[in-house]
Amino acid sequence: MIDLYYWPTPNGWKVSIALEELALEYNTIPVEIGAGDQFKDDFLAISPNAKMPAIVDHNVKGEPVSVFESGAILFYLANKTGKLIPQSERGRKETLEWLFWQTANQGPLAGQLSHFVNYAPEGQEYALQRYKGEYQRNLAVLERRLSDRDYLLGEYSIADIISFPWVLIAKPLTVALDDFPHVSAWRGRIKERPAVRRGVDLLKDRQNRGQHNAQNNKVLFNQGAEHFLRGKS
Ligand SMILES: N[C@@H](CCC(=O)N[C@@H](CS)C(=O)NCC(=O)O)C(=O)O
């Protein structure tokens, strides 16, 4: 059994989708990030950066294995099962490139765009335009890559799974995909996979639909070192 530490956001979906695609048995442990669960000592022992997703794999010889950071989790799961990852050395190298690309580029910049579109106080036009431009730049990276193949590594893989969630929500992030036809078609192909739908629907009723924002939630939106050093209060 695998424990999935999860909240229903694009970063959480990466792992719920992968677990569904791999048909691995898992037990969902909600990490209510708006309430500060991510700063509890038990969770920090698994995920020292205080972010979900994280997993603990009990289905191993010896001590359970914990993994944090979505790229590391997907790589771990793909290696464990031998699925959703190319077997050649070149293919595995390309997998790592796209996992690092997503977690260092598309993910953080889309997250900032989401922050300024959904949660920040009004009137921050410069930040909005900056992150919208960065989000579009990352869409253009995908567009070029997908211009001569259906999936990022040719075959459907964890590289697609990690890159899909932040593209899924392009419209709520105020970005149309009209200028990115290959990305739009790729998004459509992935979206219709039953395992992807199940992954995105996990705990859907608990999504932050405008309840928490930068003005009313200090735990989630105005963090500083004190959250780690003295707890969340
Ligand atoms: N680089 C991380 C990002 C994870 C992440 O940002 N998770 C957010 C939710 S989408 C979180 O747990 N936020 C809690 C917080 O910021 O306190 C990954 O890819 O796993």
Image (cartoon, rainbow, N blue to C red):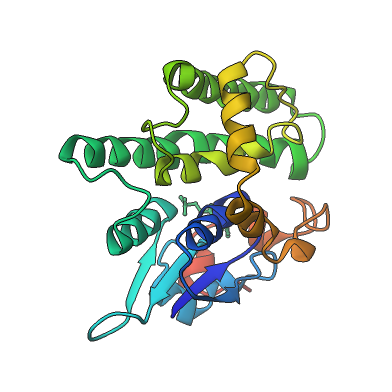
Which residue occupies the foreground of this view, 197 or 54?
197
Coordinates of residue 121 in the picture (x, y in percent):
79, 40
Coordinates of residue 128 in the picture (x, y in percent):
69, 27
Judged left or right of residue 130, residue 79 is left
Residue 127: quarter of image: top right
Judged left or right of residue 190, residue 206 is right
- The quarter in which the N terminus is drawn is bottom left
Which residue occupies the foreground of this view, 115 or 206?
206
Residue 201: quarter of image: bottom right
Q: Where is 215 relative to 81, above or below?
A: above
Judged left or right of residue 4, residue 210 is right
Q: Is residue 111 visible?
A: no
Tell me which residue sits at (56%, 30%) in the image.
Answer: 186
Q: Where is 51 relative to 131, above or below?
A: below
Q: Is residue 123 visible?
A: yes
Furthest toward the left, the residue is 89
